[in-house]
Image: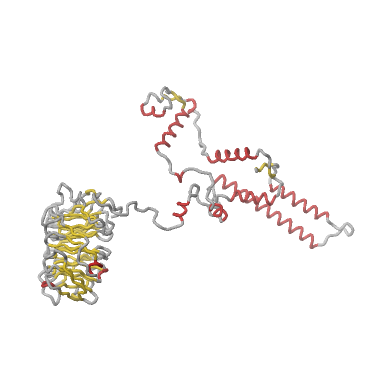
């Protein structure tokens, strides 16, 4: 079916004629016998005439707005596709067949094809200005080497200016293909849901009619999803970056490195009695601040998990607290009620409420992180050598010279489980995974046992994996944020830092690097997002690595 214009007269004039005819008809309906008309009928006719005039004025204003919107853009209201056809249909329904009639001739198919071609021509972009010199200009594309790729035939040499421009455009489009959403497309969507959306005046951009895009637009989930959720074993993809403390290396061994929870601030401390803070970006690693402690070579420094303070300790009876907000250092201790010679080793609970220090004769000292006062003690049989928190800070694991692993409930201050670490005579290191499901226990023989906590507490003493890649005392262990990597470190031998793939319980074969750049590693930490790994060594450097599997620092 097609619509063919029959009468070029505008609708407003037709309607005005109809109004005049109606008035004339009513004017002729006078009583011929009396020759008089009631006042009520005259007033009705005047009201009708005024209403008709108002309608004509409103329609004229609408047409003027349409013309202005067509010429200058949508001034009065944003453009909504699909309304013009509806308005035309309404006008046809109102006016009947005065202006248009339906043609059901057999040539309607050809007419519809012609209308489609007209629509395509309508959507094609036309040049605003055309240079007449292009037709008269001749360009030899065979002389210039970089223009020879524009030739369509081997013997072709001289072409017109307009042809030269069109070939340049085609070459540019070939080298720089446009995105799908930016292409001008006038085709209607074939999705059956499009008609219902159009009826509700909700019209999506063209080209977005497939089901996958609709599913994305109906949810608030992340549009960018990691293609590699699980870390693969075998070879670790990493790259060496600029040293984290390249702006100010330490004059002594680095004993502590730790990332702040915002992943951009790194703490580095060592025996030179300085705590340095660096902004890590992998390129410059700018130094932010340095704090000097006169009477305390730093053995360990650690952020509180809430990121507000830094706890600093050494081989002294006291320890320091550095407030990051106030930039103030407070000296705390000795602890009341205890005669301790050293508070150099400690662990902080994940909820930032408790600091657990290693004491003499198997004592574990519990200190409040708010008041910095002693709030309780725990006593194990042997000498305590290592600590690790679990269950969001409600439980504490400890090990020592008796080769046993203790589980403490900090709410009742009692040991609720104790078992021997298989093959261990002297425990030296403990570490728990972030989710608390696993823990690793290291010994002075270089063996690391990895246990499932639930099975261990249930009576199963056999570890799920025993790592025997190091032969010297295990000094430090650390799980990364998603517990897919376990770092095992020994300070007594060069290059003795191993990274284990936890899901497969295999050690990465390409780590440590073959050039032995690690020196004597002493500490290590992973950034909260897993993208960075920092390792401090005895040479005073903090080596920085990028782990390519992780997209965020």
Examine the rendered structure and indicate whether residue 319 appears above or below residue 187.
Answer: below
Q: Position of residue 431 (x, y in %)?
A: 20, 63
Quick check: can you spot residue 98?
yes
How did the renderer colour the structure? Answer: secondary structure
Q: Looking at the picture, tell me which residue is in the foreground, 117 or 327.
A: 117
Q: Is residue 292 above or below residue 247?
A: below
Q: Quadrant of the rendered structure where residue 432 is?
A: bottom left
Picture coordinates of residue 502 (x, y %)? 24, 57
Q: How many marks?
A: 0
Residue 397 pos. (x, y %): 20, 69
**With 54 as the anchor, is 171 left or right in this view?**
left
Give the residue displayed 18% in from the left and 62% down from the top.
Answer: 449
The outermost residue toward the right is 33
Spot the residue most to the top.
155
| Residue 91 position within the rendered picture, expressed as x and y whole percent measured from the top left | 66, 50
- Indicate left or right for 360 with 375 as reference: left
Is residue 290 in view? no
Q: Is residue 110 left or right of residue 465?
A: right
Q: Which quadrant is home to the C terminus? A: bottom left
Residue 53 vs 3, above or below: the answer is: below
Using the image as rendered, state which of residue 541 and residue 79 is in the foreground. 541
At horizontal 16% and vertical 53% (from top left) the residue drawn is 541
Q: Quadrant of the N terminus?
A: top right
Q: Is residue 477 above or below residue 396?
A: above
Nearest the viewer among 354 and 378 is: 378
């Amino acid at each position: 079916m097609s619509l063919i214009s029959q009468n070029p007269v505008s609708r407003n004039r037709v309607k005005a004629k109809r109004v005049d005819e109606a008035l004339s008809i009513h004017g002729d309906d006078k009583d011929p016998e009396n020759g008089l008309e009631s006042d009520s009928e005259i007033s009705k006719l005047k009201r009708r005439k005024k209403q008709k005039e108002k309608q004509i004025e409103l329609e004229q204003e609408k047409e003027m707005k349409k013309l202005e919107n067509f010429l200058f853009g949508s001034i009065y209201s944003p453009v909504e596709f699909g309304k013009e056809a509806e308005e035309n249909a309404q006008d046809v329904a109102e006016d009947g067949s005065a202006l248009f009639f339906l043609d059901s001739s057999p040539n309607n198919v050809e007419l519809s094809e012609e209308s489609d071609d007209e629509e395509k021509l309508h959507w094609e972009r036309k040049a605003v200005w055309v240079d007449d010199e292009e037709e008269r200009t001749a360009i030899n594309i065979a002389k210039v080497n970089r223009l020879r790729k524009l030739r369509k035939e081997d013997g072709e040499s001289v072409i017109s200016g307009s042809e030269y421009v069109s070939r340049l455009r085609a070459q540019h489009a070939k080298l720089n293909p446009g995105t799908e959403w930016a292409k001008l497309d006038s085709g209607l969507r074939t999705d059956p849901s499009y008609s219902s959306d159009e009826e509700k005046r909700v019209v999506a951009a063209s080209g977005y009619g497939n089901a996958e895009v609709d599913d994305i637009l109906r949810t608030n989930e992340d549009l960018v999803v990691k293609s590699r959720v699980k870390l693969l074993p075998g070879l670790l993809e990493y790259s060496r970056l600029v040293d984290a403390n390249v702006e100010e290396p330490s004059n002594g061994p680095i004993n502590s490195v730790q990332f702040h929870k915002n992943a951009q601030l790194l703490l580095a401390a060592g025996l030179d009695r300085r705590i340095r803070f660096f902004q890590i970006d992998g390129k410059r690693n700018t130094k932010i601040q340095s704090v000097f402690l006169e009477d305390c070579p730093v053995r360990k420094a650690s952020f509180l998990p809430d990121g507000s303070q830094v706890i600093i300790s050494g081989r002294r009876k006291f320890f320091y607290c550095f407030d990051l907000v106030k930039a103030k250092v407070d000296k705390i201790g000795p602890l009341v009620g205890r005669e301790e010679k050293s508070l150099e080793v400690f662990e902080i609970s994940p909820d930032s409420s408790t600091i657990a220090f290693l004491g003499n004769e198997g004592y574990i000292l519990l200190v409040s992180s708010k008041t910095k006062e002693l709030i309780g003690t725990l006593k194990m049989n042997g000498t305590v050598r290592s600590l690790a928190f679990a269950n969001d800070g409600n439980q504490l694991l400890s090990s020592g010279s008796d080769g046993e692993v203790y589980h403490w409930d900090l709410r009742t201050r009692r040991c609720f489980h104790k078992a021997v670490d298989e093959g261990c005579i002297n425990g030296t290191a403990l570490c728990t995974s972030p989710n608390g499901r696993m823990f690793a226990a290291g010994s002075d023989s270089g063996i690391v046992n990895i246990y499932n906590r639930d099975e261990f507490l249930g009576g199963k003493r056999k570890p799920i994996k025993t790592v025997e890649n190091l032969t010297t005392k295990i000094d430090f262990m650390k799980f990364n944020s998603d517990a897919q990597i376990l770092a095992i470190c020994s300070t007594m031998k060069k290059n003795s830092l191993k990274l284990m793939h936890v899901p497969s319980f295999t050690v990465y074969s390409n780590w440590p690097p073959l050039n032995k750049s690690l020196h004597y590693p002493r500490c290590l930490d992973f950034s909260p997002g897993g993208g960075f790994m920092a390792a401090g060594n005895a040479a005073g450097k903090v080596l920085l690595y990028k782990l390519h599997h992780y997209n965020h620092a």
